[in-house]
Image (cartoon, rainbow, N blue to C red):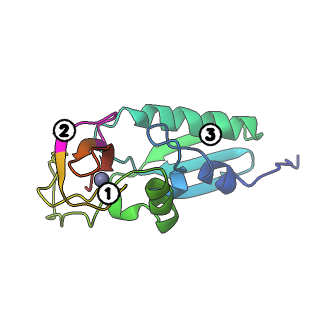
Amino acid sequence: MTATHTMSARDVVAAVMDPEMPLLTLTDLGVIRDVDVAGDTVCVTITPTYSGCPAMATIRDDIEHTLRDAGYTGVQIKTSLSPAWSSDWITEDGRQKLREAGYSVPGAAPRRAAGPIALTLIAKPRKIHCPQCDSANTQLSSEFGATLCKALYRCLDCLEPFDHVKEI
Ligand SMILES: [Zn+2]
């Protein structure tokens, strides 16, 4: 049987949106490692983003449902934990979308030592610039914003609150 799919499995997976930052696709986030198609079965390998991010289960479900809707009957999702995902993997397109939506984008991720890593998700004491007015006169309001992946800041110049996507 020759399957006819309107989109390649890779394109389907690439366009799935991140449930926590729905303006970003999984491609923008840099979480897709591999998409293998064998007949009507697709094996997708992803690297979870922030450790313990509850969005991961949603991402798996979304990939599965989107692929099934596109006609791929067998869907297998594997996770690849090494190397661990880094906010450095967010693509330039993704960063642009975040900026346009008023987010403070992550700076360079801290260097990691080899071996097991304890992810603390604690914001670095570096100065975060306000995405509205670019002032460095900002203050951390809450270590955990709307989701674990973001910290909530407030600009002391324009007084706008904003989310900073954490670097890991
Ligand atoms: Zn500001």
Please state the horizontal and vertical placement of residue 166, each as a whole percent of the image: 27, 51
**Camera sees residue 32:** no
What's the amino acid at mark 3? Val
- Quarter location, residue 132: bottom left
Which mark is nearer the camera, 3 or 2? Answer: 2
Residue for point 16% across, 64% down: 114
- Quarter location, residue 145: top left
Residue for point 52% across, 50% down: 24
Q: Is residue 149 magenta?
A: yes
Q: Is residue 80 left or right of residue 27?
A: left
What's the amino acid at mark 2? Ser
Which mark is nearer the camera, 2 or 1? Answer: 2
Mark 3 crowdedness (10 Å alpha carbons): few <14, some 14-19, many ≥20: some
- Stretch in magenta: 140-150
Q: Earlier in the sequence, mark 1 or mark 3?
A: 3
Q: Earlier in the sequence, mark 3 or mark 2?
A: 3
Q: Earlier in the sequence, mark 2 or mark 1?
A: 1
| Mark number, residue 82 | 1
Q: Is residue 71 left or right of residue 10?
A: right
What's the amino acid at mark 1? Ser
Depicted 136 relative to depicted 151: above or below: below
Secondary element under disc 1, as helix, strand or loop, is loop
Nearest the viewer among 121 and 143 is 143
Nearest the viewer among 153 and 132 is 132
Q: Is residue 155 left or right of residue 81?
A: left
Mark 1 crowdedness (10 Å alpha carbons): few <14, some 14-19, many ≥20: few
Q: CA distance from mark 2 to mark 1?
A: 33 Å
Residue for point 75% across, 49% down: 39
| Mark number, residue 141 | 2
Q: Which residue is label 3 attached to?
A: 75
Secondary element under disc 2, as helix, strand or loop, is strand
Please state the horizontal and vertical placement of residue 64, each as a whole percent of the image: 60, 36
